[in-house]
Image (tube, helix red, strand yellow):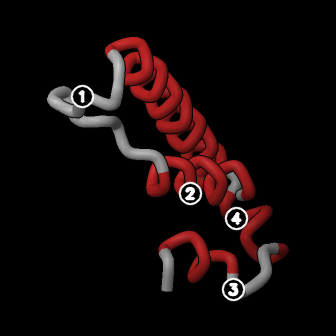
Amino acid sequence: MLRVVSAAGWLRAVEEPAVGDPGRTDVLRDRVRAERARWMTQLDESTMWMVDNLGSRAPTWPSDVPRMMIGI
C-alpha cells in the first residue's frame, strides 16, 4: 500500500523535462525518464499484488488510505 502511495506521489511530483528546455541536459532527461519508468513499474507490481490480495488485506487498511491515494 505504501509503495503505491509513494510511487504515485513521485510520478505526480516529478515530470519529465521538456526536450526544448535549455536548462536541462539530455543526461538529466534520460535519468528522469528512467526513474519515472521504475516508479511506474513499482506502481504496476504493487497494484497487481493489491488486487491479488484484496480479500485478505483490505479489511486491515485504514479507511482514509484509499482517499489519500486518489487525492481527495
Mark 2: which amino acid?
A: Gly
Work out how far the residue at label 3 is from the one at label 4, CA to CA, in angstroms: 18 Å
Residue 12 in the figure: left or right of residue 24: right
Work out how far the residue at label 3 is from the one at label 2, CA to CA, in angstroms: 16 Å
Q: Do the CB atoms of the residues marked 3 and 4 lie less than 8 Å apart?
A: no
Q: Earlier in the sequence, mark 1 or mark 2?
A: 2
Mark 4: which amino acid?
A: Gly
**Quadrant of residue 62 within the rendered picture:** bottom right
Q: Do the CB atoms of the residues marked 1 and 2 lie less than 8 Å apart?
A: no
Q: Nearer the viewer, residue 7 or 33?
A: 33
In the depicted structure, whether residue 62 falls above or below residue 4: below
Label disc, if present, on residue 9 of the rendered structure: 2
Q: Earlier in the sequence, mark 3 or mark 4?
A: 4
Mark 1: which amino acid?
A: Pro
> Which one is in front in this view, the residue at disc 3 or the one at disc 4?
3
Q: Which residue is mark 3?
A: 64
> Which one is in front in this view, the residue at disc 1 or the one at disc 3?
1
Q: Earlier in the sequence, mark 3 or mark 2?
A: 2
Label disc, if present, on residue 13 of the rendered structure: none
Q: Earlier in the sequence, mark 2 or mark 4?
A: 2
Q: Secondary structure at mark 1?
A: loop
Q: Which residue is mark 4?
A: 55
Q: Which residue is mark 1?
A: 22
- For image coordinates 59% across by 36% down, the residue present is 42
> Which one is in front in this view, the residue at disc 3 or the one at disc 2?
2
